[in-house]
Amino acid sequence: MFEFNLENTDNLARAWSFTTAHWEFHTPIFMPVWTKATVKWIDKENLDEMWAEIILNNTYHLYLRPWDETIKHFWWVHKFQNYNKPILTDSWWFQVFSLWEIKNKLSPENKTLPDKNGIILWKQKLVKITNEWVHFRSYIDWSKHFFTPENVMDIQSNLWADIIMAFDECAPWHSNKEYAKQAMDRTHNWAIKCVERWKENNENREKNWLYPQALFPIVQWVIYDDLRVESAKFIWSLDTPWVAIWWLSVWESKEDMYRILDVIEEHLPKNKPRYLMWVWTPEDLIEAIDRWVDMFDCVLPTRIWRHWTAFSNYGNIKLKNNKYKLDDSPLDNLCECKVCKNYSKWYLRHLVIENELLWMQLLSYHNLHLLINITKRARESILKNQYKEFKKDFWKRLEK
């Protein structure tokens, strides 16, 4: 019930097709992120309009609420959120990492006096890491939880996603090499345990007439070339159908991201799909596809409206700028989404200035549609052996 086929290569750019229990998807592909079983401002009918073929759910948040056992009671996350296409549940270490301290609430364990504005602040560390497990407190109710490689696999099995991610440690991007090496070794040890439990779970799923899940182990670590190569070789050696590459382009420079991709390319299997996590700008998609990457995701397309920003094939558009005050053109004349077909820059700017909530929905829709469409056009060019020309045309427009 899970198969993948390499349809064509154009230099390093690749086009794959995947068959899952919940239909097919095709790469290159950008996956919208349904963090808590929903995309901000976007419903599943919107995703169908965009021809989104696969989405990503966040295991950490669904585990905390409504709880994976609750979703299991409703049979699977597909039924829970009424989404009947392929779903990937992500590695949740980033949430553990990013929520290691919470501010602007009163900690029952660390009371402090109000600041000069009368706001009670606290900083309470929520996470403890060992080589065997991660202990953390819920940001919702302070309850205590343990993550191990084994229960991470079990929780994702309860969610019934088509594709699941191994448990890994997300060390800060500026970690020194000593700590980066420790985190990489810990991640590799966890990956071995994840693979073992994943295989056990798939055997049990088969006995109960449930479809198998595919597993992504994750290449680590930071921007040290030798550690990335070591990690790529280790992940290659694991008996899994996929390979993921973690933590590029978030805080590192684009130059570092492209360099690392070039460094590890020869050390990854060519017969396995490759997933680069947290890549979200049009230009990064174009460059990563040209560096053998097949799948992408990020939450930022539905968040950058906070900065009144829309993507385009000609560069980002910051709608508060005065130059759009009398601009009656669409956000992008190459984009065929309903926003570009029906609304002008000056109208969208008006919504922004008036703080009408509609602009958040429209920008989220456009940004997701544009990234999905870019990967679809990239796929078409790869199948025609024209990706070099496609990339050249993209940069020519962007640099005008």
Image (cartoon, helix red, strand yellow):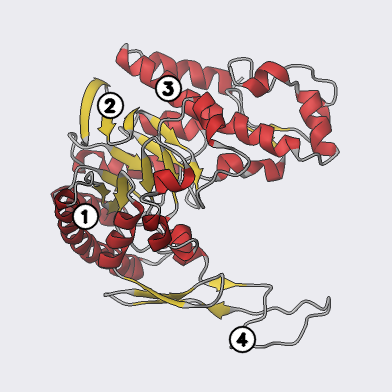
Give the residue displayed 33% in from the left and 61% down from the top.
Answer: 155
Under circle 4, the secondary element is loop
Up the image or down, 124 lies above or below 99; here it is below
Identify the image quadrant of residue 367: top right
The front one of 264 and 385 is 385
Give the residue displayed 29% in from the left and 52% down from the top.
Answer: 218
User: Quarter of the image containing the C terminus?
Assistant: top right
Q: Which residue is mark 4?
A: 108
Alpha-carbon distance for marks 4 and 2?
Answer: 51 Å
User: Quarter of the image containing the N terminus?
Assistant: top left
Question: Mark 4 or mark 2, which has the lower sequence index?
Answer: 2
Q: Which residue is mark 3?
A: 376
Task: Measuring from the top left, give residue 203's x and y in whole percent.
Answer: 14, 53
Alpha-carbon distance for marks 4 and 1?
Answer: 43 Å
Alpha-carbon distance for marks 1 and 3?
Answer: 33 Å
Identify the image quadrant of residue 26: top left
